[in-house]
Image (tube, grey):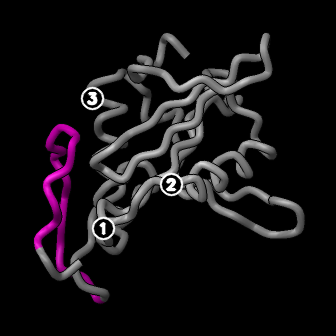
Amino acid sequence: MQTPPPQLNLPAAPLSLRSGSAGVEVHDLLRRKWVALTSEEWVRQHFVHYLISVLGFPASLMGNEVGIRLNSTLRRCDTVVYSSSLEPLMIVEYKAPAVAIDQKVFDQIMRYNVVLRVPYLVISNGMRHYCIKFDSGSGKYKLLTRFPRYEEL
């Protein structure tokens, strides 16, 4: 990311940045390592900070770049949130701020949910955020008007 990162529709996050071999790097709290600061990574780090600091999500029950096997292909969920018994509760998919959130993005996260079967799906490009809850009674997804706190999951 050579240009200054965009202002996001998320609270400011106290990110640790450094100059690395691949350019600017950010320290990923969940992966506990330095990663290249791409536009999508800028969104991820701010959103993870929002989940932890504002909505009370425990960092110890979250993972970034979680590998899953979809059919015979290895895919990576951007962030997965787990219950205290380590059952997946939420998948979060990030896009760069310039990327529109369209049906293809919703289809992508729905495919991931074929494997993980979580009740909550979240999509964010840092500017717009969507939280969808699966209603097991009706078998349908519902767009929520607000993000739940961790204890509400």
Q: Amino acid at mark 3?
A: Ser
Residue 39: image tag: 1
Judged by depth in the image, the label closer to the viewer, 2 or 1, is: 2
User: Is residue 55 rendered to the left or right of residue 69?
Assistant: left
Seen at 27% across and 29% down, the residue is: 53
Looking at the image, the residue that sits furthest to the right is: 72
Q: x%, y% of residue 58?
A: 43, 28
Q: How busy is the neighbourhood of tag 3: few (under 14 within 10 Å), some, or many (20 plus)?
A: some
The C terminus appears in which quarter of the rendering?
A: top right
The residue that disc 2 covers is: 102
Q: Earlier in the sequence, mark 1 or mark 3?
A: 1
Task: Please report contact status of discs 1 and 3: CB closer than 8 Å, yes or no.
Answer: no
Mark yes or no: residue 40 visible.
no
The N terminus appears in which quarter of the rendering?
A: bottom left
User: Is residue 121 rendered to the left or right of residue 69?
Assistant: left
**Helix, strand or loop status at disc 1:** helix
Q: How far apart are the alpha carbons under marks 2 and 1?
A: 18 Å
Judged by depth in the image, the label closer to the viewer, 2 or 3, is: 2
The residue that disc 3 covers is: 53
Q: Earlier in the sequence, mark 2 or mark 1?
A: 1
Seen at 60% across and 59% down, the residue is: 104
User: Is residue 142 rendered to the left or right of residue 69?
Assistant: left
Q: Amino acid at mark 2?
A: Asp
**Magenta stretch bounds:** 4-21
Say whether residue 8 is magenta: yes
Q: Earlier in the sequence, mark 2 or mark 3?
A: 3
